[in-house]
Amino acid sequence: MIIAVYLLCGLTGFCFIGLLDRRERSVDPLLHLFLSPGIGLGLFAHLSFLALVVKDRFVPALVVGLSVPLAVGLLTAWGWSWRTARRPACAIERLERKDLWLAPVLSLIAWPAWIQAALYPLGGWDAWSSWNLKAKFIFLGQEHWKNLFDPALWRSSPHYPLLLPMMNAWGWSFTGKVASGIPMITAFVFTIATAGLLYASIRTLTQRITGLAAVLLIWTVPLFLLLSTSQYSDIVLAYFLLGGFCCLLNGVRKNSTALMALAGLCGGFLSFTKTEGLAAAVLLALLGLWHTHHHRVSFPDKINLLKWFLGGLVLGGVPMAIFHLVYTPPNITFINGFNSATDPTSWYRLKISLMFFFAELVSSKWNWGMMLLLWGLALNARRAFQKGLLIFPVFFLAYLAILFGYYLTNTYFEIVWWLQVTLHRVLFALLPTAALWVWLSFEPRGKSS
């Protein structure tokens, strides 16, 4: 049953992308393949959340009753478009033989990832104290599910969005009970899908298979493997951030409305992952508008691309908007250090944060993977900051500025402890997108734009 649940996700996402791309056929087959499980899980999580809002309690039978017809409807519509099109709607026939090298690489990294996931079937600390706890409140709480917002549960961050808990609650709807295998396999699926998506992103933007080296570099970092399988929302954030950047760059380059819609949809899903994801989604939306505006196409084409991009953002961002407007409680673990007389902020706090950040970048815990990426950027500094790739450094600088601004402002937590338990997870979520930037910087000027 559990295997069937995740096959249903992949198939639904695959058909959704195929229908979106049925006319242009601009979505690369590898990108199509590795976006499918994430898009499928995201759609079902959003569907489950909307059903929860309407009924004011989680009804597994209703969720299953909505999900299966949606999957069947998408499969039927995609099959019809396959049959009536002169060529297959998903363009799988364009998959090249050299891309088959990805299969043994994924098999190589899947084995240790599964062993790592199985070592902690209930997940890491935040998995069972926050994300899985929220999923249990939703699935088991009936009309009392909103107790997950109780201030007494402040350690579980009640103000965090619910994308990952909704994914797991959706999976439990099919098993009929809280099964520990669902959160574990969700984390495993996103781990492997992120690896495949990183390769697919580099492959589609450079037409080279050097993305295999990027995948192996990232997955030789033991900390990355540990965090990606710990059932935290950070791996979901990493996946949709990478997908958003890849689809945006591809969509502008190919003048593709389907890819722009997928970029917007990834941004919408990203906003519902966690608070940091909302900040990343806002930056992705702004940079998407800026990057498209500077693309050399006619004004009507720009408007068309932006229309589909914003449409995807709205579709993916509806649950986030409902959550913030109706449900999200105040953040009780927040003290504004600029207004507090008892816990004021200080330049010392900012200095410690910046020193800790640079120490983290060169830490051996990353197995020198972070240093290799920085070295790659140094070697190709000119190309890394060329016009077509400028959205990467602007995003990272703005995102880190927001992050350190929050560290400086919120004096609720002791800064050294807070940095020790959170900063490595922030960098972990950025790592696949950073690897994409580095690999694109090795391309000749303008070729990866």
Image: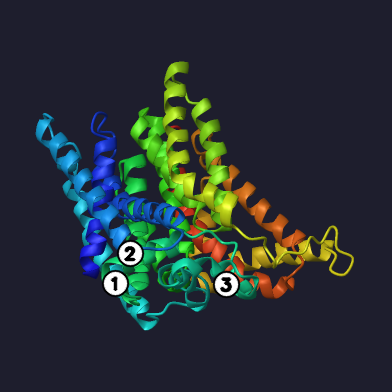
Visible residue check, residue 76: yes
Reading the image, the residue beneath label 1 is 176
Q: Which residue is most to the bottom?
A: 119
Q: Amino acid at mark 1?
A: Gly
Q: Depth check: 40 or 89 in front?
A: 40
Q: Depth check: 229 or 22 in front?
A: 22
Local SS, label 2: helix
Q: Are marks 1 and 2 in contact (CB under 8 Å)?
A: yes
Reading the image, the residue beneath label 3 is 156
Q: Amino acid at mark 3?
A: Ser
Q: Depth check: 136 or 119 in front?
A: 136
Q: Quadrant of the N terminus?
A: bottom left
Compared to residue 391, the image places residue 107 above or below, namely below
Reading the image, the residue beneath label 2 is 60
Local SS, label 1: loop
Give the foreground label among 2 and 3.
2
Compared to residue 180, the image places residue 423 above or below, namely above
